[in-house]
Amino acid sequence: MDAKRDDWVRIHNIVLEAGDRAPNIPEDTQNVPLEFWTKGFLLNQEAKIGDKVEIETYIGRKVEGTLIEVNPYYDHDFGKCVPELLYIGRQVRSLIEKDGE
Amino acid sequence: MAKDMSFEAVMGRNSEIMKKAVGIDYNVFESGSIAFDYEKMMRETGYSLQEIERIQKDTGVGNTPIYELRNLTKLARKFAPAGKGAKIFIKDEAANPSGSFKARRAATSCYHAERLGYKGVIAATSGNYGAAVASQAAMRGLKCIIVQECYDSKGIGQPEIIEKARKCEAYGAEVVQLTVGPELFYTFLVLLEETGYFNASLYTPFGIAGVETLGYELSMQFREREGRDPDVVVVTNAGGGNLTGTARGLIKAGATDTEIVGASVSLQGLHMASDTQFNRKSFTTGHTGFGIPFATWPDRSDVPRSAARPLRYMDRYVTVNQGSVFYMTEVLAQLEGLERGPAGNTSLAAAFKLAQELDEDKIIVVQETEYTGAGKHIQPQLTFAKENGIEVIIGDPSEEIPGKNIILPKDPGYIKIEEIDLNRTRRSYIRNCIQNTKMEKVTKEDLEFLVEDTKSNEEFVKKVLDEFGVEY
């Protein structure tokens, strides 16, 4: 078992299948489904990743979906070093220094 | 019997759902033709400036500081003709709770929702507004759901949007994330219907009236410190609410001579609803992908009549490239000690160039900043761009092709603005009014409305109507 009742989990759903998308959108978007994610506390006694489950979201809404993650966390960060940015500070500082003030 | 939850059925219940979720009967402001009574809508459904000041004070919103960007002014003068180079100032809206001017819009929406007895609020936004609503909802004990367009079909999300999701959750909101596509609106309606929560739309009269205090404060702060109103105020423009509210606030303060310039990042050539192009842009707001469609058809928003009508107030509309905004974000940190943005720095990049056109004794104001953080910062955003095959180049920004490369200016002299022909934008707006209402003849009231809504004159509107073969 990957998760038990009250575990904090992330679920996934398909809102619209590829063939059911709005007609006035670009073709590449029409060719893929409209997908949905939310998080909440697991209401099932236990579940495996990929199971259809029910959760209670943080504000108390009950939502069904496919279990995809247990204890989901954020991994966005400050990125890698972008060497292309390194000239900027020195350049503008030297430009105003040359003012002779 | 269970309600029909199919796409068509829910979209068909749009106006019924919205009426319950916004608490406004927009029909009373309609003329039955193109025109509607905008000022009446703002007056009868919004709040007075004094009421809003009080509401915002309750939750610590507004009265943000103004900083004079002395080093940046000095830098602009290095590239300006003799005697040119206006003084550049910035209003540090990042000082609001939740870190952006959006707290002003959210403050009035959440106050209104609480007063009307709604148990919660919902907003459809991938931007700073989500965090603003979640923060204000937390203060007022309201539940909150934020609906975001976040991922492409590979499940890859813009770091900037993911950070905003984190911030919403930090304030106790539920964040519903979706892949690319305008059918987000369907999910939004389903949630409104299911929960009975208030639609804290960005485009209601209370949302826009919430920004009026920004413009009003600007005028008051400048009269106090410089003895006069600013000459030019530059506003980052996306959905038009920031510009509309700020301009209305300036007018209410009596600052009628202040020029209002809209600025957007140019994302020309990228389709906003395209799954494959979604992650090829490095700005998720403040760009032309919102700026142009919302200027030419404001009523595309999530309420029947948008209170954000940028063409009504805009004197000039310019674009800058992505690379110049990233460059200026770095300059703001390095020369002024302010780490902000990047998206909110769109107006800063434009102001840097605009200042060089103005005399040295003029005052130009960048009217907002926004918080920066993990994901929402030049480094992760450029890292993400590179990972998505975008080339980052140091060179001439005028050669930038959105979706292909990002060009950082070789030196500040390479920062340029492109002028958007406002008469063309106005013409598109009038054409959209005609097409969407299918009018063959406009009334006298329509004519007056179109003049006001495009900040033009009767001669101009008549010329456009003639062109489309519409009688008046």
Image (cartoon, coloured by chain):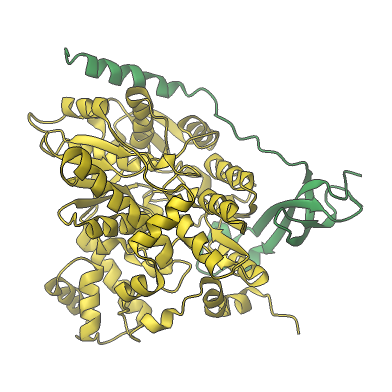
Chain colours: A green, B yellow
Q: Please state the total of marks drawn on the protein image.
A: 0
Residue B394 vs B53, above or below: the answer is above
Q: Is A49 on the left or on the right of A83, as rendered?
A: right
Residue B322 vs B289, above or below: the answer is above
Q: Residue at x 23, y 83 (%)?
A: B445
Q: Nearer the viewer, residue B402 or B238?
A: B238
Q: Nearer the viewer, residue B292 or B70?
A: B70
Q: Residue at x 55, y 72 (%)?
A: B21
Q: Is A94 on the left or on the right of B390, as rendered?
A: left
| Residue B274 in the image, given as x and y percentages of width and height | 51, 55
Q: Nearer the viewer, residue B247 or B267?
A: B247
- The image quarter in which residue A64 lies: bottom right
Camera sees residue B277:
no
The residue sitting at the left extreme is B82
Residue B111 vs B104, above or below: the answer is below
The N terminus of chain B: image quadrant: bottom right
Q: Is B361 on the left or on the right of B398, as rendered?
A: left
The C terminus of chain B: image quadrant: bottom left
| Residue A92 in the image, given as x and y percentages of width and height | 29, 21
Q: Is B432 on the left or on the right of A53, as rendered?
A: left
Camera sees residue B200:
yes
| Residue B399 in the image, given as x and y percentages of width and height | 31, 37
